[in-house]
Amino acid sequence: MNSALQSSVNTFSIKAVFLDFKEITKAGLAISVLFSSVAGYFLGFDSENPFQWSVLIMLIVGGYCMVGASNAFNQVIEKDLDKLMDRTKNRPVPSGRMSPNVALILATVLTIIGLILLYLINPKTAMFGAISIFLYTSLYTPLKTVTPLSVFVGAFPGAIPFMLGWVAATGEFGIEAGTLFLIQFFWQFPHFWAIGWMLFADYEKAKIFMLPTGKRDTSTALQIILYTVWLIVASLLPALGYTGKFFITKASAVLVLLLGLWMLFYSVKLYKIRTPKAARTLMLVSVLYITLLQLIYIADKFLR
């Protein structure tokens, strides 16, 4: 009986540690970010830079470590703010299940492992990974309680993963990687403003500024529409023939345009009714949009 009890305790402890690790690294978010990097890698490799399983695996593991480290640092920095919000108060650090020191050590170890793995791919991949984690933890996170411009600052590290895959595949940052960066950069604004609108009351408790005007008003809704339009324009750049080795066919351009108009429809809908439910719908649509967009780009490369 004692043996069975001990086994149950050990199983519970291992499960609890695993669940806390998932939560402090934001596994769901990390995996979605990794999808962008993997998509960028598939777009980047060619006969000159052939596909390598070792590079892809290091990109996935190293990328997860870097995203997980950013999220862990973020939760240490914002532990007191997280206690104020319903959405975050049960996270490992604010709930007391994990001490800030343990979380800090975990974040540091993940950063070191991530940088080493990305450096083994090539130095430029590691450099952009380091820039991303620095901007996210040192600028974006502290600015969230100071100015709505934090979303603009956060869009830079948020846009790096897509182009990071290209850099991992080619070892170069050129017009192609820059285009991938630009697409995901413009995507950040309607996506995060939709989240800010949906969770406005919760963010307000912690005095976190996510919306450009600080309010769920017409001006914010108009800016969401504007950046969605810029996103559509950026997503169609590969069809114009000026983005180097990264280009798409006319048929794929039509699909990309239709996909963009689908997201624009929900941006306009938010402007019309301005409800948290409409914002949530736009947020979900934006996630599907960026995923489908990347899949269209990949399919175009291999099917044309």
Image (cartoon, grey):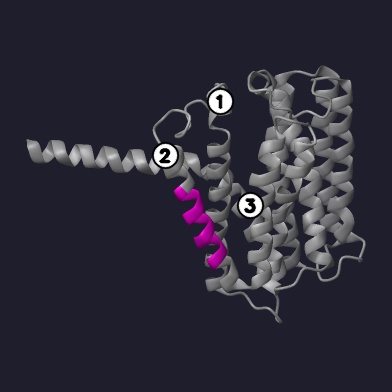
Q: Which mark is residue 87?
A: 1
User: For the residue marked with disc 3, what is the amino acid?
Assistant: Ile
Q: Is residue 34 visible?
A: yes
Q: Please name the residue shown 74% across and 55% down the image.
A: 296
Image location (x, y in percent) of residue 43: 71, 65
Q: Which comes before the other along the chain, label 3 or label 2? A: 2
Give me the C-alpha separation between circle 1 and circle 3: 23 Å
Q: Residues within 10 Å of mark 3 (few under 14, many from 20)?
A: many
Q: Which comes before the other along the chain, label 1 or label 3? A: 1
Give me the C-alpha separation between circle 3 and circle 2: 21 Å
Q: Tell me the element at label 2.
A: helix
User: For the residue marked with disc 1, what is the amino acid?
Assistant: Arg
Q: Is residue 281 visible?
A: no
Q: Which mark is residue 133?
A: 3
Image location (x, y in percent) of residue 249: 85, 62
Image location (x, y in percent) of residue 268: 85, 28
Name the main secondary structure of what is drawn in magenta. Answer: helix
Q: Please name the residue shown 15% across and 39% down the image.
A: 6
Q: Which comes before the other along the chain, label 1 or label 2? A: 2
Image location (x, y in percent) of residue 153: 76, 43
Q: Tell me the element at label 1.
A: loop
Which residue corresponds to mark 2? Answer: 20
Q: Please name the residue shown 88% across and 57% down the image.
A: 237
Q: Are marks 1 and 3 in contact (CB under 8 Å)?
A: no
Give me the C-alpha separation between circle 1 and circle 2: 15 Å
Q: Residues within 10 Å of mark 2 (few under 14, many from 20)?
A: some
| Magenta stretch, residue numbers | 105-116
User: For the residue marked with disc 2, what is the amino acid?
Assistant: Asp
Q: Is residue 72 magenta?
A: no
State whether residue 246 is above or below residue 98. below
Q: Quadrant of the C terminus?
A: bottom right
Q: Residues within 10 Å of mark 1 (few under 14, many from 20)?
A: few
